[in-house]
C-alpha cells in the first residue's frame, strides 16, 4: 500500500535541552526574534520554553533548509504540517524568564513574564479573544518584539505564518526534489501559492459545521484554494448525527481530514455504524471525483480560481446566488447541498437556472432559479452536477494511489429538455489535467503531463457526439489511462448506431440505454479508449 507521511511541528525551537543541535545552530546563525533589549525573545509553546525563528530574515531560510535536510535524512517525511504559527504563545509578555523546571505537555504558562506598555502594546483598540477583549500581544509574540531589520512585530505579525510557509516550501522542495505538501494554520493573502490550510480549532457543533463552509469559501477567494476544516470538530464531543453530517460535507472540502484535540474521546467514523456508512458513501464519491479535484488544483495554480466556490462565483448574474452561504460549488459544475442543522432529514436548497443531476442516482432537478426541498435521510448528501458539464471520474478504491491507476468514466450532462424543441441543440465541455503529482512545477510539459479537452453536442433530432482533444498525450499513453465508460445524461431518443473513432478506426460500441427515474441517459461501456489519444463518439437514432 502506497502511503505518505507528514510530520507536525510548532514554530518555537526548544531551549530546554542540552546538545539540541537545531537550537544551537540557530543561536550561532543568530536567527531568532529579539525583545526590545536585543536579547532572544523567550516564549512558551508545547516543547516548553522556546525561541521563535525570524522567518523574515534571509539567513533563517538557509538555517531551516539545513534542519529539514538533517531531519529528512533520519525520517524521510513527505510533507510538513506547521501548527501554532500565528505565532501562538502560552504566555503573554515582553520579557520572560525560565527557572529551569520543565513541565511537559503543559499549555499553562510557567515562565515569569512582564510586559511593556507602549502605543504598540496597548493601542486604542483590542482584539476579541474568545469573547473577551485583550491587548494585541495576548498569547502571542509581544508587539515590541523586533525582526532582523528592526521591524516591529506590531507591523509584521500577520506575515509570520506566510513567511514560515515560504521558507518551509523552499526547504522541502530542495530536500525532496519533488513538489512539497505543506499545511499551515496561519495564512495571509497569497499563502495558497505555498501551502494548504486548515481553518483552526473548531468545535463539535452544527454551528461550527455551517461556519466551516463560509470560512472555506472565503479562504479560496483570498487565494488559499487547498483548505478544509477539522471534520467532526476539534474541541468537544460530537453527536452521531453531527459527525455523520460533517463527514458528508467535509468529504467535499478541497482539503479533507478529521482531527481531534488530545485527551478527547475518539471521533473516528467507525465508532458509529451510521457514520461509517455515511463516510463510505461520501468519501466513495470524493475518491471517484479525484481527477476532477486534481484538475481544479491545476486551474487554481494557473488562474487563481478557488476549488470550492460560492454560487455567485459561477452564477454572477443570479442575484439569489449572493444570498447562499451553506451550499457550495466544487469547481463550476458540482453543487453540494449539505445538512447543517441537527435532527434534520431535508434540505432547503437553491438551484441556479438549468438542469442539475444527482451524482448518485442521475435523478434531475430542472430549475428556473428556485429553491427546492430535498430529501436528506441520515445517510444522504445531495450532490448535483450542472448541465453543460463533462466530469472525469475514476473508480472508488481504498487509496488515492489505487484510484489513480483505475479506469475512467466520463459523465456528460445535457439539459433534460434538450430534445424537446425541434430547433434546439445543447453542448457540454470539460477538461482533465494529468501529471505524476511530484514534479516541482505543475505545468503542461510534453512527456510529463497531459491536458485533455472534452466537448459534446446533442441535437434536437437525437444525434450527438462527444470528442476529446489531447495536448501532449505521451504522458497519458505511458500511464496507460483508459476511458472505459461514458454516461450521457439528457439523451431522450435511443440511438440505433454508436460509432467510436480513434486513430482512423471505427468500431461499433456496446451500448446500454437506461432511464434513471424520469431522466433518460445513454450508457456506453467497454470502450477501451486511450486517454492519451483524441477520440470521437457519435450516436444517431436512425
Image: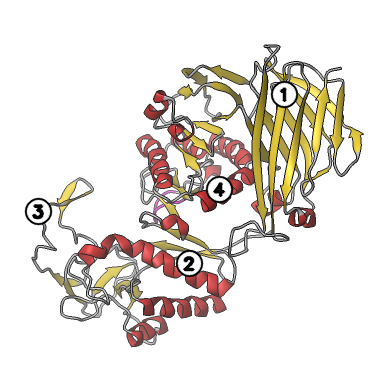
Instruction: Tell me the residue that label 4 is attached to.
Output: 299
Of the residues under marks 3 and 4, which one precedes in the sequence?
3
* SS category of the residue bearing label 4: helix
Judge from the rendering whether residue 537 lies leftward or rightward of residue 21; answer left or right.
right
Q: Residues within 10 Å of mark 1 (few under 14, many from 20)?
A: many
Image location (x, y in percent) of residue 199 = 39, 49
* SS category of the residue bearing label 2: helix
* Coloration mode: secondary structure
Of the residues under marks 4 and 1, which one precedes in the sequence?
4
Alpha carbon separation for disc pair 1 and 3? 64 Å
Query: Residue at horizontal 62%, vertical 43%?
Result: 292
Where, quadrant-wise, is the C terminus in this rendering?
Answer: top right
Along the line of sight, which residue is nearer the eye, 321 or 278?
Answer: 321
Instruction: Tell me the residue that label 2 is attached to.
Output: 169
Alpha carbon separation for disc pair 4 and 1? 27 Å
Q: Choose mark 3 or mark 4, whichever is in front.
A: 4
Image location (x, y in percent) of residue 402 = 71, 52
Magenta: main secondary structure equals loop
Q: What range is drawn magenta here?
A: 259-265
Q: Which mark is residue 124?
A: 3
Along the line of sight, which residue is nearer the eye, 514 or 98?
Answer: 514
Image location (x, y in percent) of residue 114 = 12, 70
Amino acid at each position: 500500500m502506497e502511503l505518505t507521511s507528514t510530520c507536525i511541528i510548532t514554530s518555537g525551537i526548544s531551549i530546554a535541552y542540552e546538545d539540541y543541535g537545531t537550537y544551537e545552530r540557530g543561536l550561532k546563525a543568530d536567527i531568532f526574534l529579539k525583545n526590545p533589549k536585543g536579547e532572544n525573545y523567550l516564549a512558551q509553546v508545547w516543547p516548553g520554553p522556546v525561541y521563535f525563528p525570524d522567518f523574515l530574515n534571509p539567513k533563517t531560510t538557509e538555517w531551516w533548509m539545513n534542519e529539514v535536510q538533517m531531519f529528512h535524512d533520519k525520517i524521510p517525511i513527505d510533507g510538513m504540517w506547521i501548527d501554532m504559527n500565528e505565532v501562538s504563545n502560552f504566555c503573554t509578555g515582553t520579557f520572560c524568564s525560565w527557572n529551569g523546571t520543565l513541565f511537559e505537555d503543559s499549555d499553562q504558562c510557567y515562565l515569569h513574564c512582564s510586559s511593556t506598555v507602549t502605543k504598540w502594546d496597548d493601542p486604542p483598540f483590542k482584539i476579541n479573544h474568545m469573547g473577551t477583549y485583550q491587548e494585541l500581544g495576548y498569547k502571542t509574540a509581544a508587539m515590541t518584539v523586533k525582526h532582523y531589520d528592526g521591524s516591529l512585530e506590531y507591523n509584521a505579525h500577520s506575515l509570520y505564518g506566510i513567511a514560515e510557509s515560504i521558507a518551509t516550501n523552499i526547504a522541502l522542495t530542495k530536500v525532496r526534489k519533488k513538489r512539497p505538501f505543506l499545511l499551515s494554520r496561519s495564512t495571509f493573502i497569497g499563502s495558497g501559492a505555498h501551502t494548504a490550510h486548515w481553518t483552526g480549532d473548531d468545535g463539535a457543533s452544527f454551528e461550527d459545521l455551517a461556519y466551516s463552509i463560509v470560512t472555506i469559501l472565503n479562504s479560496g477567494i483570498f487565494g488559499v484554494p487547498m483548505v478544509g476544516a477539522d471534520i467532526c470538530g476539534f474541541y468537544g464531543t460530537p453527536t452521531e448525527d453531527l459527525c455523520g453530517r460533517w463527514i458528508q460535507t467535509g468529504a467535499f472540502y478541497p482539503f479533507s481530514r478529521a482531527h481531534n484535540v488530545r485527551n478527547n474521546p475518539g471521533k473516528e467514523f467507525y465508532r458509529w455504524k451510521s457514520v461509517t456508512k455515511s463516510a463510505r458513501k461520501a468519501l466513495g464519491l470524493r475518491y471517484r471525483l479525484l481527477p476532477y479535484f486534481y484538475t481544479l488544483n491545476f486551474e487554481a495554480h494557473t488562474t487563481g480560481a478557488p476549488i470550492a466556490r460560492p454560487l455567485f462565483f459561477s452564477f454572477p448574474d443570479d442575484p439569489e446566488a449572493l444570498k447562499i452561504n451553506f451550499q457550495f460549488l466544487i469547481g463550476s459544475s458540482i453543487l453540494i447541498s449539505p445538512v447543517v442543522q441537527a435532527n434534520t432529514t431535508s434540505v432547503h436548497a437553491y438551484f441556479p437556472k438549468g438542469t442539475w443531476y444527482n451524482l448518485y442516482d442521475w435523478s434531475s432537478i430542472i430549475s428556473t432559479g428556485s429553491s427546492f426541498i430535498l430529501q436528506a435521510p441520515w445517510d444522504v448528501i445531495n450532490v448535483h452536477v450542472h448541465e453543460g458539464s463533462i466530469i472525469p471520474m475514476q473508480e472508488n478504491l481504498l487509496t488515492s494511489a489505487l484510484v489513480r491507476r483505475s479506469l475512467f468514466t466520463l459523465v456528460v450532462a445535457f439539459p433534460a429538455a434538450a430534445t424537446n424543441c425541434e430547433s434546439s441543440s445543447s453542448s457540454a465541455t470539460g477538461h482533465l489535467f494529468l501529471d505524476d503529482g511530484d514534479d516541482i512545477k505543475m505545468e503542461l510539459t510534453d512527456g510529463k503531463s497531459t491536458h485533455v479537452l472534452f466537448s459534446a453536442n446533442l441535437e434536437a433530432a437525437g444525434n450527438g457526439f462527444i470528442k476529446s482533444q489531447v495536448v501532449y498525450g505521451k504522458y497519458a499513453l505511458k500511464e496507460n489511462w483508459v476511458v472505459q465508460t461514458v454516461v450521457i445524461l439528457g439523451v431522450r431518443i435511443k440511438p440505433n448506431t454508436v460509432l467510436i473513432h480513434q486513430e482512423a478506426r471505427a468500431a461499433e460500441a456496446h451500448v446500454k440505454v437506461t432511464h434513471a427515474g424520469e431522466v433518460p441517459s445513454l450508457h456506453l461501456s467497454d470502450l477501451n479508449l486511450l486517454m492519451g489519444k483524441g477520440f470521437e463518439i457519435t450516436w444517431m437514432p436512425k
